[in-house]
Image (spheres, rainbow, N blue to C red):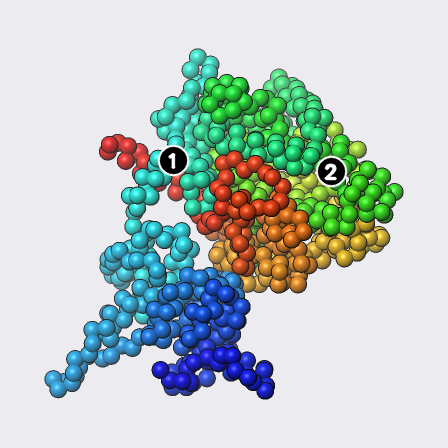
Amino acid sequence: MHSETLPIRDVECGNPPACRMSAVRRKIVKERGSEPNELEESVAQALFDLEATNAELKSDLRDLYISGAEEVDVSASRKALLIRVPFRLLKPFHKIQQRLVRELEKKFSGKDVVLVGVRRILPPARHARQSARPRSRTLTAVHDAWLGDLVYPTEISGKRIRYRVDGSKVLKVILDPVDRANIEYKVESFAGVYKKLTGQDVAFEFAPSEKADQADCENFSSGSVDFSGGNLTFSTHPQGGAAWGSYIPGRHTDSNFGQLTITTSGLYSDSEQVYAAGFLEGYLTAQEIRDNWHNMHTYFVEVMNASVQEPMRWIEKQDSWLRGECSQQASRPAADTAEARFWSATCLAVRQFDGLKHGYWAANGGPGPGKYGPMSDWDFLFLESNADLYDIIDWMDPSQRPSWSEGASSDPHEDEAGQKGMGRRHRRDSLATTGKCSALIKLAPDLSEIYFGHSTAMLRIYKHYNFNLTELRPAADRMSFSSYPGELFSDDDFYLLSSGLVMLQTTNKIFNDELFELLSPSTVLSWQRIRAANWLASSGEEWAAHLARHNSGTYNNQYMVVDLARFKAGQVLMPGLLVVVEQIPGLVESADETDILAGGHWASYNVPFFPRVTCPALATCCHAAPAPAGGPRVTHWLSYETSPRAKIFRRDQANVHSVRSMAGLMRSNNWQHDPLSDGHPLCAVCGRGDLIPDGPLSRGCYDTKVTSASHARKMEAFAVNGPTEGHDLPPFDWREFKGQGLPHAGMPQRFQHRFEAMAVGSMQELEERCLHATAAM
């Protein structure tokens, strides 16, 4: 070992900057003493910083250094960072590789980091007197060794050569499925780096796992429902009938997202199809529905300390009014107007809701205690309408909201709404917790791709609906979306629609008391209008028009609707590609914001964009009015331009050039070190209210979904559930949570999960494997 290769340790130095630079340069030693380039110096700097600041890696990194680094273009929108390691240091690097790669991928956001050993290929002996070269220095051996380096610590279980139609060959490498969740997202980068190193094509696949399949099949349920004597009956046969589908709970998946697929038969009427779909969902997900109701109801009543009886009477009045309108709609002659189609779609959503209730009751043995627990009509209304209910509670119970309307007291401890004891920190946290969602739409600089990301809250099911509605003839007969047990819409929202629309949403809180006076139960709730718009709309403009019909003014959101029919990779963006829609009581505003997206991105973070929405929602135009009682330091959190997440998105969106890098940004939280977070753990893209030092809250971003235009066209996304671990944040554990005592039925004690593909195809493959396994028994 040469002494000049060792990093400087704790020595006295008269010139600290020079010593620091020298120490950093000791983390890279290139062959023949050549100078490192800018990228290599940045990698060396990152290693030096990790050695200085990361307690887990410090001792292991002390004697380690690299030989080089380069950026590899894997595809038009994906890059990898290839780091070359001295062969003799490969084992010490392997010891910490998983932790080290995770940290480096945070520092080099958007790049997949891979490590390979420096190996030398020797030519074959040219004459008899020349000694034979070691086998480890042959071209074949070195290429095989690089394969092992790329996928470490995953084991390679087999290799095959396959020939294409044109005669070219490709190496197929079979990987152990045990680590699939850890490395599946990187196999494209592995292939790109191997091509760079060897000039050869390689395809990575995962071997089937009998053990994993057995575990999945034990927790996988499927079935169908059909009408018999006017009533629906459930059968474990997975095909046929009015509706059929399958389900695996989140507690048995890598991502902690359950997955549900339901398909209906076009041989039945639209009303029968949606009722059967709801019934099957209620039957298959009964346990999770009860868990979700228990968690939500306890949160409202015990944690929020909200009185729900009077708000729920408003919801019951709305339900009664809506069913009356549906009865009148059914008695009218069929019409093909936009208004008539809106009512047809809305009433089908209500019919599906009825099926959901009856399916649960069938699985439970009735509405009473039964197998899973009592669930009345009232309980189902509460669960389905909980998003709309927040605004009803804010209206009827002023103690649930900070009141900044004209005339409100400037005293931070009391105002006219009767809020006593709401001091500065409470007001400050009420601003930070006005929303839990973050969304980002990122356009690749070369216009080759669009990436989508969304983060929000938990007990999750990702749902795939495939309707064959012959009477409504919807623009979107298939929809895939993140959701919750017992809810027939996303609630986040995050939708992929077969019409080619992608819809994301974040919620905007109403701070203006006067707007609540516009609420009326003779309107259509947000979740009902969303379902109708999703079925009917073939463009963002149509979607906005349907949402504006009979606006309830409850669950007020910013919706982003991307029309993939207007996106052609590499071509100028077409008008109408991105339509943004915002709702408050009495107003739905929408506009084509494709020009802003053309600048690189559109971000959403629980703050309204349109002035006609912003000023009424905040009781006054926040840029011109005196600061509310929370103080000027935090009122910028309500500004679309100066909100902490606005600044973070503007800074970090440039690093997104793949689905993986989008996932990294949407899970990011570096609140302790990022000045843009204002020292608050909720002021990050993926907030963690449980980490507030002087009063943990059960609020924040507790899941993430990501996709791209190319994946969305195939109705595919990637999702993970649970609070982020961000930049060295501790995993969330219910046993260590010091905040409000919250029920968490159906949730794991500790959240440490991984992204997982959400696709109908993956569920169909699992169903086929399970059916095959059952038949073989």
Residue at 44%, 68% (x, y): give it.
81
Q: Percent from the top left, x then y, of residue 240?
A: 37, 26
Tell me which amino acid carries mark 2: Gln
Residue 167 placement, left or right of 424: left
Residue at 53%, 59% (x, y): give it.
728
Q: Quadrant of residue 233?
A: top left
In the foreground, 629 or 486: 629
Question: Circle 2 — which element?
Answer: helix
**Label 2 close to label 1 by CB (< 8 Å):** no
Q: Percent from the top left, x then y, of residue 365?
A: 47, 19
Dot label at residue 400: 2
Q: Percent from the top left, x then y, of residue 771?
A: 31, 33
Q: Which residue is mark 1?
A: 219
Residue 43 placement, left or right of 634: left
Is residue 60 among the parts visible in the rendering? Answer: yes
In the foreground, 471 or 451: 451
Q: How many labels, in total?
A: 2
Tell me which amino acid carries mark 1: Asn
Which residue is at the far right?
407
Q: Quadrant of residue 588?
A: top right
Q: Is residue 625 above or below residue 337?
A: below
The numbered mark, 2 or 1, whose residue comes first in the sequence reads 1
What is the spatial separation of the Cα atoms under label 2 and label 1, in whole angstroms? 41 Å
Is residue 532 among the parts visible in the rendering? Answer: no
Assess disc 1: are there few (<14), some (14-19) or many (≥20) residues with their C-alpha within 10 Å of its C-alpha: few
Q: Which quarter of the image is occupied by the C terminus? A: top left
Residue at 34%, 39% (x, y): give it.
215
In the foreground, 670 or 355: 670
Q: Quadrant of residue 544?
A: top right
Question: Circle 1 — which element?
Answer: helix
